[in-house]
Structure formats: structure tokens, C-alpha cells
Image (spheres, rainbow, N blue to C red):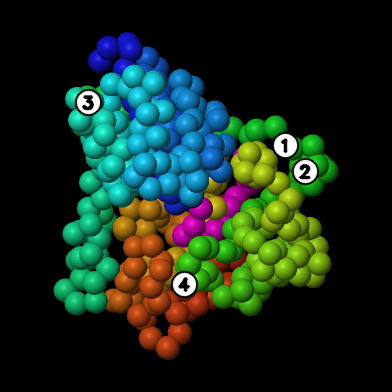
Amino acid sequence: MSTTQKIIVLRFSAMGDVAMVASVLKEFSEQNPAAELIMVSRPAFKPFFDHIPNLIFHPIQPKTLHKGINGLYQLYQELRSYQPDAIADLHDNLRSRAISTFFRLTGTKIKRIDKGRAEKKALTRANKKVFKPLRKTVERYADVFRGLGFSIKLSHQISKSARALPYKAKTLFSDRTTKKIGISPFAQHIYKVYALEKMETVIASLSRLGYVFFIFGGGDKEQQVAENWAQKYPNTYDLIGSFNLTEELAIISNLDLMLSMDSSGMHMASLVGIPVVSIWGPTHPYAGFLGYGQQESDCIQIDHPARPNSIYGNKPCLCGVENCIDLIEPETIVNKIEEKLNG
């Protein structure tokens, strides 16, 4: 490829998916140092890309400046100033297709992600389910760049590199002898959330073993839950609403382990090289959304012929009276964490 290749990369949401893009672009940039990347996503997600060389972040404002077809044309005009050689559409939604079409009309090369919709439907349907691992989402992202003529080989390995802690978090890490666990117990969809009373049992058990906990992710309602846990159990800290995304990533990078749902907490930990023990309900790692570099053996889930029945976790479990995620015993999670930290 020419040394002047500029690629506009489109992926606007969701948070976990955008974090996975960052993991791929990190390795792409290392392997293609002459390429220049223009990442287009929501402003809140910019910290995911701050440590990637040869990358410019360009925000999309879908609710204001870039709303509707006229707003998307405005975004196209902004992006055209970069004089891109190619468009990598890693989203394939109405907005990304509109922007791609504007560029295609000027002769710019376009490559769009193959989301494998038919395979995913077969994996999650109730009848004649085809239960097999699908192509990892990160490889689907990488395939787009391969289709544009670039070489990229993903390592599928996490690489820990602790970032400088924010000033107000330093005292929480003053004791370097204790193992520190992040907990991301919430998710956008309720069906992916492990029962809070059972998660509290996990925290209580691990607290007695002397670990330090930091709770991430959520709004006011979740913060009340996290604050209650922090008050009840020693060395448990509620970080919800106290740090921005850049600071949260720095804190996570100093952990020993993250305990997460199938949610953005898992992908944030992957981005900064932290191993994750993840809890799965109606979704499944076979769909391709396991955190980058994480091990399927660290996924805690039950075997049931109805699983998975959802790709995104926006549908209730079909396993019976009790949600499949709540059939997981707290002791199973505690034992896995003990094995990861001390095995």
C-alpha cells in the first residue's frame, strides 16, 4: 500500500462494540504504521482511542449537528476534508450506509462489515438451532481492513500496561499487597444482569478473603446499589459517577482482575489488558462478542439447549421459570476468581 493511505473508520455505538474496535485498531496501527486512521464515533468514546498512534478522532453528533440526512451530509463534508482513500464501515447501519454512499459517489473505496446475521439467527433460534462458534466480531472488523488491501493479524492476546492513576484514586491503591478486583455488575439490558442479591453474596464471600473491590458502571439507581455494598463490606468502593472514562480506564489498568457481565466492562478491561471473569445468561460467547483476548474458559454459564436465545441480551431467557443467568451459583463465581488470582 502507499504510504499516504487514509482510512475513515465508522462505528458509532454501542459502548462495548466501540471498545472492541479500539482493540483492533491498536494492533492495526502497530502493523500498518504508515496508515492514518480517522475514527468516527460518539464523543464519549474518544478515550478508547487516545493511546493509538496515527489516529484522529472525529466525533459524530447524531442528536444535534449530524441529525437526519442533512446532518449526515454535513458530517460527510467534514470527513471529506481528510481526503480519505477508503472507508471502513464497521457498523453497517442507516447512518454509516448513508455516509458510505456519499463517499462512493466520489469514487472512494468502501468496505462494509459482514455481521453474519443469518448465522447469528441460526445460533439463537429456538428450533433447529445451529450451536457452533461464529467468527469473532474483532475478526469481522479486521476482515474489513483486509478487504481494503491491508495486512492485519490479530494476536488475540491481552497486553497489560498500567496507566497513571488519577490523583483521587491513588490512595485506593496504596496497599500493593492486596489483590484488586473490578466489578461491572450492571448492563444495558436487564436480562444480562446477574441477580443483585447473588452478586452481593459473591462480594461478601470475596470480601472475607481480603480482596479489594471497585464497582464500575451505571446511573443513579445502580449507584445506590453500589453504595450500599460499599457501606456493608470492607475494602469495597463505589466508583460510579466519580471518574470520567479516561480515569476509569486508568483505574481498570491497575487491577488484577475484572468481574463483568457480557457488557462494556468486559471490553474496557480487554482494552487495557486485564483478565476478565464474565457471567453469561441469554447471550453466549459463541456469538463472537467475548472480550478481546479473553478466554472462553473464564466465561461462567450454564449448559442449556435454549441457550443462547439472544445476540444482544435484549430478550428474556427461554430456559424455564428461572433465568439461566440466575442458575449460576455464587460459589462457582468465587471459585473461578480464586483460581484466576491464586492458581
Left or right, 206 with reference to 175: left
**CB-based contact (under 8 Å), mark 2 and mark 1:** yes
Q: Answer yes or no: is residue 139 visible.
A: no
Above or below, comparing residue 114 to residue 107 in the picture: below
Q: Give the extent of the magenta segment.
A: 252-264
Q: Secondary structure at mark 2?
A: helix
Above or below, comparing residue 108 to residue 20 in the picture: above
Give the residue type that dot 3 points to: Thr
Give the residue type that dot 2 points to: Ala
- Point out which mark residue 106 bears: 3
* Mark before the other along the chain sequence, 1 or 3: 3
Q: Secondary structure at mark 4?
A: helix
Neighbour tally class for label 1: few under 14, some 14-19, many 20 plus, Cα within 10 Å: some
Neighbour tally class for label 2: few under 14, some 14-19, many 20 plus, Cα within 10 Å: some
Quadrant position of the N terminus in the picture = top left
Q: Residue 250: percent from the left, percent from the top? A: 65, 39
Residue drawn 41% across the image and 66% down it: 313
* Mark before the other along the chain sequence, 4 or 3: 3
Front of the two marks 4 and 3: 3
Residue placed under numbered mark 2 in the picture: 169
Residue placed under numbered mark 4 in the picture: 191
Which of the pair 153/69 is nearer the observer?
69
